[in-house]
Structure formats: C-alpha cells, structure tokens
Image: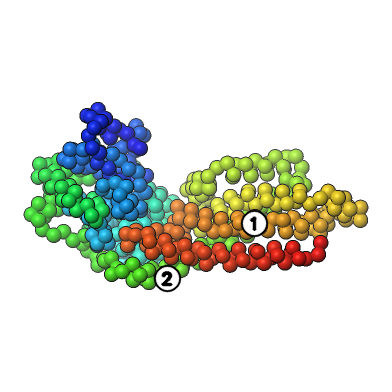
Amino acid sequence: MWLGVHALAGVAGAAAPVFRWAGDPEGGAPFVEADPARPDTLVGFDVEIAGLMARGLGRSPQFVNVTFTSIDQSIARGDAEIGLSGIEDTPARRASLAVTVPYYEFREVLSVRDADAGRLLTIADLRNKTVGTLGGTIAYEILLRAERDVGLHAVSYDDDVHPFGDLLVGRVDAVLLDNVLAERRHRTMPGFTVQPQSVAVGHYIGVLSAGNAPLRDAVNEILRGAMRDGTLERIFRSWRVWNDDQPKLFARVLAGEPVAPVIGIETSAAATTWWEAAARYLPSLLRASVVTLTLSCLSMALAVTIGVLVATGRVYGGRIARIALTGYVELIRGTPILLQLFVLYYGLAAAVRLPAFVAALLGLALNYAAYESEIYRSALEAVSVGQLEAARTLGLTERQVLTLVRAPQAFRLALAPMTNDFIALLKDSSLVSVLTVLELTKQTQIFATNIGSWVVPGILCAGLYLAMSLPLAALARQLEARWRRAPE
C-alpha cells in the first residue's frame, strides 16, 4: 500500500470512511507515479483528483495498486470504488461500466525521430513502418486499423516508457500515444519530435462499476464544481498539462452537452454479445497461438542443446569448466526470468540491438537450459558405475561410453521431467509480452480489456493452451511406455 498523501488521512481521523481508488504507478507519470524524491509517496494529477473526490465525499483516499490493463476488471469486481490512471473514454467502457464526465481532453499524436520529422507526418506516411503504443488503448485500436488500411506494423507495450526508448534506438519508427505522455517523455528524452497534427481526440475519465451510478453522480458533481472554481485548472497547470483544449471541454461539460468518447476516428463499440466478440477475436488468438507454439518449440530445442552441453561439461569437464558452468546455472536459477528478459532486450540495447523475437527466444532458452542441465546431469550420474566400468573393460573410449551406454539411458530417465519443462515453458512464454512479442496471453489480455471481461477470453485462451500442451503430454507418455517395454 502506498503512503504519502494518503497517510494524511490517519492524522485527520482514523474513523473517517475510505475512498478506494485504483491506478497503476508503473510508468504512470504524470497520472500516478512514485515520487522520485520519496518513493513511498504517490504524486500525479490523478492522485490529486482522487484526493479532491475523497474530500468532496467526506472520505479519506486509499490507493489500490492495479495493473493498468486490469483496472476495468478490478473495478467491476469491487476492488476499488473508482479507477483513475489516465483512463480513456471508449464506447466499450460506457457499455460495461459507469463512467464519469470527461475531465481532460487529449490528442493522439505521432512521435518520430528528429531525422524523420519532415517525412513521417501522418499515419499514411507509415506504410511498412513499425509503430509502438500502449496495449488496450485508443491508440492501439487506431494502429490495428492502420495495419489493415495502411500496411504498417503495430507493436504493443505494457508501459509508455519503453516505446520512446525503442524509438530512439531504432526498434520502432514511430510512437502513437496521447500528447500528455508524448510531451512528458519529450522533456526527459531528447532526440524525437512530437508531430503537431492530431490523429484523434479523446478524454480521460474515471470508471466505476455499472451498479455504482449513485456514487458516479456524486463524483460528477465534485468534478463540475472543480471545473467552475478553477481547482482542476490549478491541478493541471501544476503538472504542465493545461492547454487551450481544456476550457472548451469544461464549458461543454458544465453546459450538459454530450461529449463523444473519441473524435476524429470511427471507433468500434462493444459487441452485442461476448460470443460475437469471441468470433471477431478468434483469428488473432489463433495467430498468437502460432507465435507461442513456434517460440516455445524453438526455445526448448535450444535449451535442450545448451543443457546437454552444460551437463556434459559439468560431469566430464575440468575444474575451471565445472566452476564456470555451475556459476551459469546458479546465476540463471537465482534470478527472475523477467529480469533476464529485460537485460537481454533493453539492457543490452546500446551494444547489441536484438529483435524482440530473438531476445525472447534467447531469454527463454538460456533460462530453461540451466534447469535442463540439472535434469541431464542427474540422469547421467544415475547410470550405474558398474555399467560404465564394464563398457570401459570392453575397450570403449570415454566418448563411446557416453554416446552408446550412458546418454541413451540418461535420456530415458530425463524424458518425463523434460516434458514437464516444455509444458512449463509453453506457459512461461507469456512473459515475453514485456518485449513486445504478441503471444497468446498478451492477445487475450487485449481482447479482455477491449470487451471489459475475462470470462470468454479466459476460456478461449485456456482452451488453446490445452490444445497445444495435451498432445505433447500424450506423446511423452507413449514414448515412456514404449521404452519401459523395450529390453534392457
């Protein structure tokens, strides 16, 4: 739980009811972020707006940390009263949640490297180019449509920091995000230009559960009051995001005029039923399944190869080789795979600019190779010394002993744990979405975010994973049964 401004509630009176609000501080500036000077304190204009709402309701604000793409689902299940974290007004959210009046108007803008500022001006200029954005946003929906209409390649990120980092190192040719994020990053990451043209116009809102309309109405009155007395303007000015678009939005909201969720593009409303949405998303889930299966098979093949070499080196190698290989195994097993993936893709970018799929392949392979090597080492050492001595007595060289006597038996012993590891790797491949690889779990997450529910996406995703893993498990059982029947 975050402290800072929220800890002040205890000073005012512990008995005050709380106002729980959800947000994501990871890369969440200037909406919600940890204060760099005091990491246990939250800052951001949505933090201040949450405090404004809480005071207006006579409550004390209490922050609930929720991943950005899961805020809608978390609000629907009652983890918090309201979600505030630069949440965009969309038709899908209006259909499934109670949304507040818009309190900020933003523009979707393109950011390109300074050298490309004169030729990459609009979406139409990005044919055959790679463009990054946040997943589950209006910008991502725009890029998906542009993939079909223009011929660009859309890349989805989990945060708004790495797209601009990849832009500067050349992994993507442009970034499409709202002007608040683009201008914020531009102040700290020189080297790219924010194009002045607007691709679309949208609005930030708060989201509440569909059954919480009375609280939504009370929050709306607080927001309207803050628009009238200048409180919202002061908040936005202090965060350097106030511009000429906001007075026009405030005037329309205070006049009771309807404000369209997105202006400048045609947006897809929520599907009539979940199953209609499933039919629309199933082709993309199947494509993502192919990515998952291909990545898993290639990674496992490489992991097995490296694992065999490491195990052999630890059993037969000299002292220095054994120490080095043992160090590799312990380093890999002692650090999180997510950290290893980040180091391969982002940490080494200045020296070695690996493509996302290659970095994912190497990361999974190197991680699982360490575990595989332990399986093979124990299997090699499980072959009885008597058999090895008998083979040497018959005049076999050490290489022949290994290839003809020891390795075949060790492989039979290692088959079951190898199968388990491959199924585990198939599921762990979902982690590579942090490197912008659009695999099955990431595509499912986008599907769930767009329709506001995990029920149907979760069922489809689980079914596809089972369809990939169960045949492998059945094949492994058949091989084990055949080898058990085989003569020794």
Mark 2 neighbour class, 10 Å CA radius: few under 14, some 14 to 19, many 20 or more: few
Q: What residue is rendered at 86% in x and 50% in y? A: 386
List x then y, in percent, for residue 397.
Answer: 86, 54
Q: Which residue lies under the disc numbered 1?
A: 418
Q: What residue type is labelled 1?
A: Met
Q: Which of marks 1 and 2 is nearer the N terminus?
A: 2
Query: Is 13 in front, or is 198?
Result: 13
List x then y, in percent, for residue 259.
Answer: 16, 59
List x then y, in percent, for residue 305.
Answer: 67, 56
Q: Is mark 2 on a helix, strand or loop?
A: helix
Mark 1 neighbour class, 10 Å CA radius: few under 14, some 14 to 19, many 20 or more: some
The residue positioned farthest toward the left in the image shown? 255
Q: What residue is rendered at 14% in x and 53% in y? A: 249
52 lies above or below 94: above
Residue 283: assigned label: 2
Tell which tag, 1 or 2, sits nearer the viewer. 1
Q: What residue is rendered at 22% in x and 45% in y? A: 241
Identify the image quadrant of residue 92: bottom left
